[in-house]
Amino acid sequence: MKINELEVLIDYSFFDQELIKTAIQHKSFNKNINNERLEFLGDAILNSVISDYLFEHFPNHQEGILTRARASLVNGSTLTNKAIEIKLDKYIKLSKGMINLDDDRKLSILEGAFEALIGAIFVDSGWKNVKKVIYKLYKDDLDNLSSINEFKDPKSILQEAMQANGMTPPDYNTVELKDDNFESSIELKGMKYNAIGKSKKSAEAQLAEDILKNGDFI
């Protein structure tokens, strides 16, 4: 497929056509000229643009919520979906031996190519234009962020819910187990809840989530 068709899909025309050619060229196709450096740059640019958007549009939300919201927008599955939306899989240049890869590896390549494309746009014409392209590609995702509160961690949601019902904030009893996992427990209204995680933080988060799902703590 012709590269100019990809430019139409992303609504951006490159001044330097070599940049877009490099962005879609995997290292298996050419070990000397490939998209790895652009991928590195694109990852940073994408995170910065999304961070800037969240900072400007949600002034009343704290760092933790903004971080989780950003993570949902730049994680591997989201980037892969974005790549598929612009049919990037039709343009990526791979070696013949890479064409029959398993699906997981192919998805990783798509993710990297999408980041490389973002990096290429930034190099081609700077922050203002790459920001414009990202906003267009993420329009639906950003429009649906009105419910950003859903990105609160379970512990915060549980604490707020308990305080809203006149209850004392939860007091987690968390201990390290012999198998290097952690177990967290709490007693609410005569009922004991417990959960296990690979870290103290994950055990307490899982415990809070389990209590919220149960829904009978108030």
Image (cartoon, helix red, strand yellow):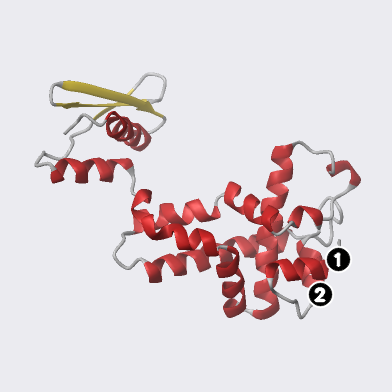
Query: On the picture, is 37 further left or further right than 47?
Result: right
| 178 versus 106 height, above or below | above
Residue 2 marker? 1
| 8 versus 167 height, above or below | below
User: Which picture quadrant has residue 91?
Assistant: bottom right
The answer to whether one can see residue 26 in this image is no
Query: On the picture, is 147 further left or further right than 1?
Result: left
Q: Nearer the viewer, residue 188 or 179?
A: 188
What residue lies at 27% left-to-right and 31% top-to-bottom?
Answer: 211
Whole-percent x, y for residue 21 in the image: 82, 66
Q: Residue type at mark 2?
A: Gln
Circles 2 and 1 in contact, beta carbons < 8 Å: no
- Could you say whether the residue bearing mark 2 is in a helix, strand or loop? helix
- Could you say whether the residue bearing mark 1 is in a helix, strand or loop? loop
Query: On the picture, is 16 further left or further right than 47?
Result: right
Taking the view exactly as shown, the residue that stands out farthest to the right is 96
Residue 17 marker? 2
